[in-house]
Amino acid sequence: MNDRLQKYVENTAKIRELSTPQVSEVRTAADYSMNLKHNFIIIGKLAAENRQILSEELFPYLEPGAEISQERIDSLGDFCDALLDAYNLDNLDPAIHDVLSQKLFADARASRDVRSKNMVLGIDREITSCYTMMNITQRLISFPEIAEAYRKRGFSAADQIAELIEPEAFAALPDDECRKMVLINARYMWSLYEGGQLSEEETRHNYNMLLKELLLADDPEYINRLPDYDWRYHKFRTLSYISMLLDYNNRRGMPGDIVEAIADHVAEMDRMWHSDPEYFANLMEENELHLHVLRADYLSGRMDKTHYHRNMLALYDMRDPNDYGLSGMTLNVMLSTEYILSLDRESVPESEKHVLSRFYADSLRYAFNMSGKDSLSYMLEFLSMLMTNFIEIPGVMTFEDFCLSCIAALHPPTYVHSTMVAQFTRCITRHLLKLHPELFDDVFRMLKTDDEDTVLSFAFHAARCHDFGKILITDTIMVYGRRLLDTEFELIKKHPGAGADIMECYKSTARYANAARAHHIWYDGSAGYPDDFDVSDLPERVIIDIVTCADCLDAATDTVGRSYSRGKTLFEFSRELSEGAGTRYAPWLPELFRDKNFLADLSYLLSNGRRKNYERVYDRLKSVYEESLTYMGV
């Protein structure tokens, strides 16, 4: 790639590093917030340079009808490959990778040379990109149509791989590198079915795709065509993909006869691994292999639930809690979810509640130590499954507690934002109860109370939970080095609905769901998102209006950890509030923002609250870091 594109890659990596300062490199809580503020000043400069690079080096090529040389195509292809490395879990900029891979693939297809190297490279990038974007977007389980669009694109590329893997077409490919790439994608494209709502016909097709690839490892025609290829690797990797068809307690719904067949394949994989542990340990750690075996045996009926649980817990005890590779995430987070999915949600015995409590605490500790790791997107995939299958333990761990801890671990600035919005909301509510108590009549009736403290508590918790949907798209909200693409902004617009939908599933958060869903909707409903949710008749309408104001207030004034632009003063925000009263903001807010007692309390929160909240999150991160050192014996 050319020097400027290389500079974009380096800047983006640097931005990631600066946006997540390591607590091990900071001595005090005060230094943490100061360092973060300083880092975002640097991020602003790098971001400006990145935006210029993209506008001059990439976006012109993405315009319809743009024609460029083969040398330029090669350079952009190298750039594309540097932005996403699925094998090494390094997703530097998957959204830019996606728009570029889509364009390179479209141009390769336009040449009509279906066996050219450009075509094979284009297919490879397209399948990798579609799978990555599908994985990111299917965390938003309330909006399956987004992931389905990427899945459909991926299938289009996979159809061409299915043609190229046929003997005659395979032999006609230009070189062995292309043949290897076709083989890799022929087994990898099974993953495009992951997470979808499959019919029995589709599940069988998914299995048969992999079975066909498995047979190639013993096919003399293919072996002779590609004698230097590691066919042993191909066979083992295909067996592992077959095993993954049973992920998450057979989420895909594989029929009983196929589950039986998969269990046989997993047993074959186990025998293969133990025939040469030194070689196969580089492909899959032994404990991860054991997880595959246990799950297959349980789901096929070869092991009862009691022994399954006992063996799973023994395997969990042997995990490395500081392994942040794919195997480490599988054993630290996915194993927990697999275990939970095998429980009866409606009747969890006391003994299992202890196990769940341990799983939750360990998963949060693991997430807190994720800071700065390249594999965040993969971690979010595992964590979102744990969230959507969470079982609350009242008095020990509620869904609200778990999600707040996840936010603190994965993106401290969003945790501070949620806390600030909660404090602003409580402050606004307290003063508004004095100024216009009649606005809360419906809230008192809804909560069946005449106690103001109960209303204040409700408002505070609703505000703390308002951004839970952002957990699912943490990697998207951490895009600092460039403007958001339309696809990314559409994802962000889904976070209120996604958060509300999952909150409605849990007792600790269900009653705050409307505030989460509506906090980006304008007061008069003329703008904002989602655009299909009417808040006008909700009894907690006044609380939603307050949370909306508090959310905008914090976003406008924060200059520490969520923005590299100059924050507005309280005076500037108050003027914006007055201008938008009755449209964007509630009409009674400007009066409150002229109240001297209210402004004094609000000014205190602005001058001291944010700093204290960053210090609190630092103390929390530091505590987990030191606990990890103790665990490792450092």
Image (spheres, rainbow, N blue to C red):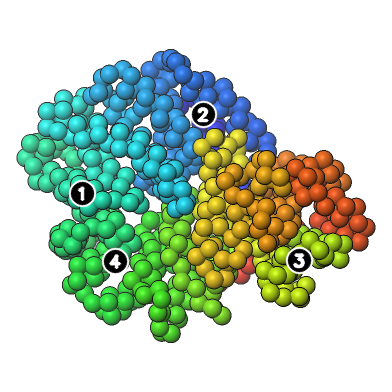
Residue extending furthest toward the right = 596
Asked where in the image residue 70 lies, by quadrant, the reply is top left
Q: Give the residue type at disc 3.
A: Asp
Of badges 1 and 3, nearer the viewer stands 3
Q: Using the rendered image of the protein, determine whether residue 447 is visible from the camera's viewpoint.
A: yes
Q: Residue at x 66, y 66 (%)?
A: 461
Q: Earlier in the sequence, mark 3 or mark 2?
A: 2
- Label 4 Cα crowd, 10 Å radius (few <14 / some 14-19 / many 20+): many
Q: Tell me, for residue 291, which label it has, or none.
A: 4
Q: In the rendered view, would you say 449 is above or below 464?
A: below
Distance of mark 1 from mark 3, alpha carbons? 55 Å
For the N terminus, the image quarter is: top left
Q: Give the residue type at disc 1.
A: Glu
Distance of mark 4 from mark 1, alpha carbons? 27 Å
Is 185 or 433 nearer to us in this picture?
433
Residue beneath label 2, please?
Answer: 5
Q: Are marks 2 and 1 in contact (CB under 8 Å)?
A: no
Of badges 4 and 1, nearer the viewer stands 1
Q: Give the residue type at disc 4.
A: Leu
Q: Secondary structure at mark 3?
A: helix
Q: Give the residue type at disc 2.
A: Leu
Distance of mark 4 from mark 2, alpha carbons? 42 Å
Residue beneath label 3, please?
Answer: 441
Residue beneath label 1, please?
Answer: 201
